[in-house]
Amino acid sequence: MITGLGMIFAPLNVAAFLYIPRSLRGAAVGLLALLRNEGGSVGTTMGQTITERREIFHALRLNENLDPFNPAVNSFFDRADAAFLQQTGDPAAAHQMALQSLEDLREQQASSLSYFDAFLIFAMLAVGLAFLVFVMRRSAAQKGQHVAAE
């Protein structure tokens, strides 16, 4: 991942500093580093917030189908109770373990769906931002010119 980021940041730095006068490049480097760090923090925070909120949403939606009249839930409890009863020999403990197993399964599904939602949101944002490439100014650098060679 770090190698991939290096492949992105190096050309971005060259493009950013190409038109900056040499006397201002020190300030530009600091400003770019600050904005890159802040952008990473904000992006991570947004991703975590989206994931947590969508996980709560999906957990509540999955709860709508977990009722005693749902044949799939009853079938799950019958099989889980039998399996845990064979392990423990205690019907009450087996039922508690079956309930915990169903809760764990619901949390895993809600978490998976929330990660998919966050990925989808950021993918749409990336596609939207990709169109900014077409409005960027073309580089005035000559082929083979190095910015640091001044």
Image (tube, grey):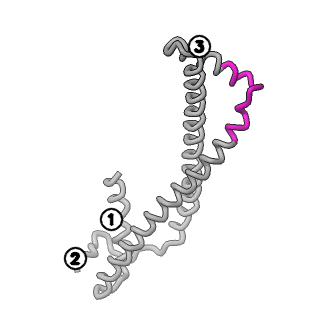
Between marks 1 and 3, how big is the CA–CA gap?
60 Å
How would you rate the neighbour count of disc 1 (Cα within 10 Å): few for under 14, some for 14-19, many for 20 or more?
few
Q: Is residue 26 left or right of residue 45?
A: left
The residue depicted at 73 percent of the width and 37 percent of the height is 64
User: At x 50% / y 66%, what residue is drawn?
Assistant: 133
Is 136 in front, or is 44? 44
**CA gap, disc 2 to disc 1?**
15 Å
In space, the residues marked 2 and 3 are separated at their CA atoms by: 75 Å
- Disc 2 residue type (three-letter): Ala
Instruction: Determine the secondary structure under disc 2.
Output: helix
Figure check: 32 above or below 109: below
31 or 5: nearer the viewer: 31
What residue did someone put label 1 on?
A: 10
Q: Which amino acid type corresponds to the residue marked 1 in the rendered image?
A: Ala
Q: Residue at x 64, y 42 (%)?
A: 59
Q: x and y percent of residue 78 in the render?
A: 65, 16
Mark 3 — residue? Answer: 82
Q: Which residues are magenta?
A: 61-75
Residue 39, position as x, y percentages in the image: 45, 67
The mark lying in front, picked from 1 and 3, is: 3
The percent coordinates of residue 53 (x first, y second) are: 60, 52
Q: Is residue 59 left or right of residue 85?
A: right
Choose between 33 and 86: the one closer to the eye: 86
Q: Quick check: is 67 in the magenta stretch?
A: yes
Q: Is 47 placed above or below 36 here?
A: above
| Image quadrant where residue 81 sits | top right
Residue 144 falls in which quadrant of the image?
A: bottom left
Residue that carries the numbered disc 2 in the rendered image = 149
- Of badges 2 and 1, the one in the foreground is 1
Q: Magenta span has 69?
A: yes
Between label 2 and label 3, give the one nearer the viewer: 3
Say which residue appears at 32% left-offset and 86% top-offset.
24
